[in-house]
Amino acid sequence: MPQKTKLSTKSCVYISLIALFAALLALFVTFGSISSAVLVHHLKTNSSNKAEKPYYTDAQIEQLYQLTLNDDSQSYTISKYIGEQKKDIHVVIPAKYKNLPITQLGNDLFSEEDENYDPIFEVTSLTFEKNSNVKVIQENCFYATLIKTVTIPASVEIIEKDAFGETDLETVYFEPNSKLKEIKRYGFARSYNLHTVNLPEGLKIINPYAFECDDIINLVIPSTVTEIGEHAFYNCTKLESVKFAPNSQLTTIGNCCFQYATFTSIVFPEKLASLGSNCFCLSRNLETIEFTSPTPPSTPGLDDCSTVTKIYVPAESLEVYKTADGWSRYASKIHPSN
């Protein structure tokens, strides 16, 4: 019969201490989990209930801007900047005034000039308050300002004529879920340092001369754009790439749209129905053009495209393109796409 091992008093004490420690540890973990859950819930509750503090008080807004109550009596337009006349002005556009949304920025808001045609306000930076309600940026609003970058709020639906014309802009971004529908004539024209712009899905019309700029390098046209006006990207002498987003709805491209561009090839979307004259005039690097529409877009002709060696079209439409008005003179260059 095996002999029973008798535990010493010291061993019993050690075992008891280990059991006690394990029990305390279990209690600590349980309590800690409960406390953490309560703390997280408390933080979430406080976070959701805590209102976002406005950047400006109403009194501060009145020291900077003149505001006009809109016809709907439910929103305001900032009609004039009355802040200090100085250099290096950092502009913040408030979201609300008297608890009503600010939905429009008025004409010539920061573009006033003195008798020598020098700007009165030297605006060097522009920020929109979080949850901005601005829907319309009116004509010449930021014309000739010195801002270098801007993020357009998702609420903006229309950018009017020359709103950002002749600025020092280098980059233009649009917030996610942008409601922008139209960029009017000269919207960003002659902002010659502009090299990056991420046009948002939802945009429908790019009007004439909207981006007459030198430095844009790459361009993606959103699928929702239906019309690009004449000279829209005129004189973009560094434009190396133009792509159209999948499922493009584009039907119309105006005259001289990509004049002076430097890309070597371009593929047009299937729904393109009208292509203006001189679209690629003086685009000396262009070698190949591809059309994906089975029906040749109406065009007066691809004038001054001597560098183009091949025009690709759907194989089933090869003869249709070669004999169509405006296309027959290029028959020798038209080939079936792969």
Image: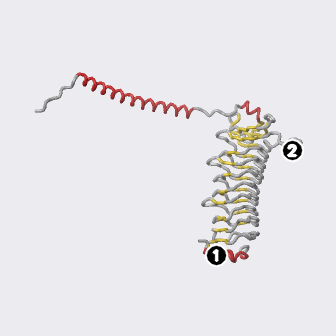
The residue sitting at 64% across, 71% down in the picture is: 312
Out of 105 and 69, give the one closest to the viewer.
105
Out of 223 and 169, give the one closest to the viewer.
169
Kind of residue indicated by mark 1: Leu
Name the secondary structure under disc 2. Answer: loop
Provide residue 330's location: percent of width, then percent of height: 71, 75
In the rendered image, the vertical position of residue 98 relative to residue 119, given as above or below: above
Quadrant where the image shows the N terminus: top left
Residue farthest to the top? 9
The answer to whether residue 187 of the structure is visible from this angle is no
In the rendered image, the vertical position of residue 141 relative to residue 272, given as above or below: above
Apparent side of residue 29 relative to residue 206 in the rendered image (left or right): left
Q: Which mark is residue 318?
A: 1
Q: CA distance from mark 2 to mark 1?
A: 57 Å
In the rendered image, the vertical position of residue 158 relative to residue 35, given as above or below: below
**For mark 1, does the 10 Å Cα neighbourhood hold few (<14), some (14 to 19), or many (20 or more) residues?**
some
Kind of residue indicated by mark 2: Tyr
The residue sitting at 59% across, 71% down in the picture is: 338
Provide the residue designation for mark 2.
Answer: 117
